[in-house]
Image: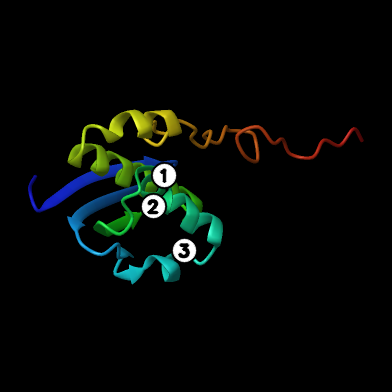
Amino acid sequence: MSDVIQATGRRKRAIARVSLTLGQGVIRINGKPVEEYFPRPQLLQIVRQPFEATQSLSRFDVTVKAEGGGVTGQAGAVRHGIARALVEIDESFKTIMRQNGFLTRDPREKESKKYGRKRARKRFQFSKR
């Protein structure tokens, strides 16, 4: 095993470049602690899910560069990247990650805006008279 494992996670428009190193379980996203970057407990739970599934939270330090999208998309992208990196470290984690759906990239994207409409499907207010 090399000293740094890198992986990319994606969700919606968010992209997370994840680096895993052996350590004490410190997670830093864009230079900030994970609790500061994702203040909502649901987002913290999403980020930590791959480690909880493999009981390896205190074994690795995580450094993430997250960009694009919103906070929820970025949290999903970080989870995807961490899961991919853990599988790269230990192939036996693959079945656990697959069963929990952490390796599957969420394919849902924003539908593009259409001409003559306010958004993708919303129409302008109709006036009969």
The numbered mark, 1 or 2, whose residue comes first in the sequence reads 1
The image position of residue 112, as x and y in percent, is 52, 34
The image position of residue 113, as x and y in percent, is 55, 36
Does residue 1 lie above or below 98 as drawn? below
Q: Is residue 77 left or right of residue 118?
A: left
Q: What is the number of the mark on residue 38?
A: 3
Query: What is the spatial separation of the Cα atoms under label 1 and label 2, in whole angstroms?
Result: 6 Å
- Image quarter hosting the C terminus: top right
Query: What is the spatial separation of the Cα atoms under label 3 and label 2, in whole angstroms?
Result: 15 Å
Q: Nearer the viewer, residue 106 or 48?
A: 48
Q: Nearer the viewer, residue 119 or 24?
A: 24
Name which quarter of the figure residue 37 lies in: bottom left
Q: Which residue is mark 1?
A: 13
Name the amino acid type tagged 2: Gly
Asked whether disc 1 touches disc 2, contact meaning CB atoms under 8 Å apart, the reply is: yes
Q: What is the number of the mark on residue 68?
A: 2
- Callout 2: helix, strand or loop? loop
The numbered mark, 3 or 2, whose residue comes first in the sequence reads 3
